[in-house]
Image (cartoon, rainbow, N blue to C red):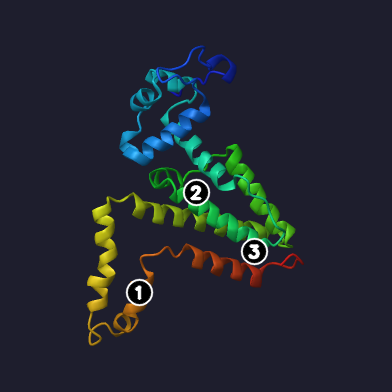
Amino acid sequence: MAKRVVPETARRRRRPTKQGQVLTHELIVETALRMLREHGEAGLTARRLGLALGADASTIYRYFRGMDDLILAIADELFGHAMADWAPTGDWRADLRDLGLRIHHAYLAHPQAAVLTASRVTGRPNEVASDEMILGILRGAGFPDAEAVRVYHAFIDQSLAFAILDAATLALPRAAREADEEVWRDTYARLPASTHPNIAATAPLLVARMNDSAYPIALDMLLSSAFRDGSSGTSR
């Protein structure tokens, strides 16, 4: 059964933790992000989080209904990182491109957290504010509502899908990641034209490109397609 969350005014500790900190929702989330970065998903437990905070594990449940509730808070925090200090310019394509890259960057800054959270829907303030902003940009550019939702759907799913894909690569042990990167040079670049003419013809380009994220290219393709198919506004 999910635990009852104590209201903020009632759950605040009256004295600091062993580390001299007063626990807050934000402190717990940031500490959990750090633990994910340092130890991965397996290292994030209530007991370990309590130790890192200098508090009893049960204290976590005064702020969150359970560990999944904390995971959703982490997901929303990453959206907050992406949106921090951002303001639209009025150029819808430039604004969406910037937002997409910021979302992608925010997740890749915390790859273990990205793999754990990018597929979740939180309905929390930062996520909701991001969605409101994206839909407002599209509707303000003249997209009919149905088209605005279609482009929004593709835009946000593409952003998060690439976040998971690229974060999963960054979350690999360094030796495994480097071994994967070398496959393009050590295997693909050596395939003979007699059996693999298309790979052989493009091998130098594959070696140069395939270890980089395709997200910026895919994002540009999406926005170009959206411009051709849906926008009738003047802010183009």
Displayed quadrant of residue 231: bottom right
For disc 2, the marked residue is 106
Residue 69 visible in the snapshot: no
Q: 172 or 164, which lies in front? A: 172
Amino acid type, label 2: Ala
Q: Nearer the viewer, mark 3 or mark 2?
A: 2
Element on which disc 3 rests: helix
Query: Which residue sits at x=24%, y=61%?
Result: 179
Which corner quadrant of the image does residue 214 belong to? bottom left
Q: Residue furthest bottom?
A: 194
Mark 3 and mark 2 lie on one chain; the one further toward the N terminus is 3
Q: Residues within 10 Å of mark 3 (few under 14, many from 20)?
A: many
Residue that carries the numbered disc 3 in the rendered image: 93
- Quadrant (top left, top right, bottom left, bottom right) of the N terminus: top left
* Residue to which mark 1 is pinned: 206
Give the amino acid at mark 3.
Arg
**In the rendered structure, are the residues bearing label 2 and label 1 in contact, judged by CB atoms less than 8 Å apart?**
no
